[in-house]
Amino acid sequence: MSELHISLAIAGVLIVVGVYFYNLYQENRLRSKAQQAFTGGEEDVLLKQEGEGLPDDGERREPSMDFSLDGPEAAELTDDILDVPAEIVSPASTPEPVTAAAVAPSHVAEKPASAASAFDEVVDFVATLTPVESFQPGDAARFAAALEGFAGAVRLLGLNRLTGQTETLEEARQGYAKFFAVLQLVNRSGAVNPADLADFCRRVEGAAAALGASASFPEQAEAATRAAMLDEFCVSVDILIGVNVVSSNGDLMPATKIRALAESNGMKLNADGTFHSLNEDGVTLFTLANFDQTPFSAENIRHLSIHGVTLLLDVPKVAPGLRIFDQMLLQARQIGNTLNAVLVDDNRRPLTDNGIAKIKSQLATIYTKMDAAGIPPGSERATRLFS
């Protein structure tokens, strides 16, 4: 072996070692940044969790409010506890698989948006397909077909060459300069796992090859780490506050009176069997459900008698949360005063002023934590993450 061959071999080894340590450095740097972004650096004494991250069954396990105290104060405030009504908590939603129908027909195109505003750098993993010239009619459907059956939450978008705006893909439109497959990394079902992320990228690369385009996307390991950190943060603030209103003497309440009280406060009966309090944009602020679990309907309300109702506040999805909590509490008290009922926790213990003050203090802490992480409660980002 000549001196030149030996030198080249040594140089090759040094390059491989250098790339390895550079990747290791990048991974550690990302982990450090993610921890700074999504952890407060202090133990949160207001949240009680059964374990770190995801439990063994892979399902997100939400925290519950812990109002327990040690020492002599415990006896004094025992009756102030308000537990989250676990039996009312809605199950985590499961994202729909992508189908070819994900390509929107021409008459229901979304309002165009710039590429920057169409994506969320915190929530989304964006794959980009760039053609040699421009995509042809039918390419959008073929792109969607490549992702059909993928179990993640994916949006398919296109960059309109004429307007320079990013819009939902339309099968019949011509002149797209780029295609985008936007994978949401986290929702209430949990974080996208590395295997699904790799599958997503393989599908996109396959579509690009079939369409004669090039594919590009962020580094997968970084995205998986970011998704896990973001999901861990979301679990720590994903809480429902429930206020139960039950008969003080055990008598049943006519559901017709509940409906009258709810509607007098502007609430609407929803298809999910609960009454919703909505803001001017139609966004749910809080809900009113049957304490006995049977969903309300226009038919059964006429003859239904119940033991009480539960008013629920979905903490991370509502702003301004403290004011909405006060509004929900006011309505609960109105129902109680009208129907000779009392406000209680899940153990039928009366809810006192001390208990309410404790809830509001914890709510303020959660909202401050969300703001600091760049996920304002009630924002579009929060709505996507907690859906």
Image (spheres, rainbow, N blue to C red):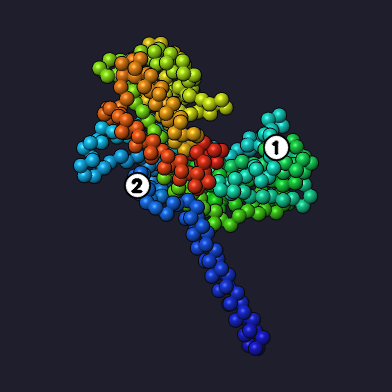
Q: Is residue 5 left or right of residue 71?
A: right
Please indicate, yes or no, whether residue 289 appears anywhere in the rendered image: no
* Occupied quadrant, residue 149: top right
Mark 2 or mark 1: name the one nearer the start of the chain.
Answer: 2
| Foreground pick, 271 / 367 | 367
Task: Calculate the distance from the C-alpha at mark 2 to the C-alpha at mark 1.
Answer: 44 Å
What's the residue type where badge 2 is placed? Val
* Occupied quadrant, residue 68: top left
The quadrant of the picture occupied by the N terminus is: bottom right
Mark 1 is surrounded, within 10 Å at the Cα level, by few (under 14), some (14 to 19) or many (20 or more) other residues, namely some
Judging by the rendered image, the residue that carries numbered circle 2 is 45
Instruction: Determine the residue located farthest toward the top in the rendered image.
Output: 302
Judging by the rendered image, the residue that carries numbered circle 1 is 112
Q: Residue 170's spot in the image, x, y percent?
A: 70, 36
| Foreground pick, 359 / 122 | 359
Q: Residue 66's spot in the image, x, y percent?
A: 32, 41
User: Marks 1 and 2: in contact by CB < 8 Å?
Assistant: no
Q: Is residue 315 left or right of residue 205?
A: left
| Foreground pick, 346 / 273 | 346
| Foreground pick, 58 / 74 | 74
Q: Residue at x 47, y 24 (%)?
A: 276
Q: Residue at x 41, y 45 (%)?
A: 236
What is the secondary structure assignment of the residue under circle 1? loop
Please indicate, yes or no, whether residue 53 appears anywhere in the rendered image: yes
- Can you tell which mark lies on residue 4? none
What is the secondary structure assignment of the residue under circle 2? loop
What's the residue type where badge 1 is placed? Pro
Mark 2 is surrounded, within 10 Å at the Cα level, by few (under 14), some (14 to 19) or many (20 or more) other residues, namely few
Q: Residue 90's spot in the image, x, y percent?
A: 42, 33
Q: Residue at x 24, y 44 (%)?
A: 70
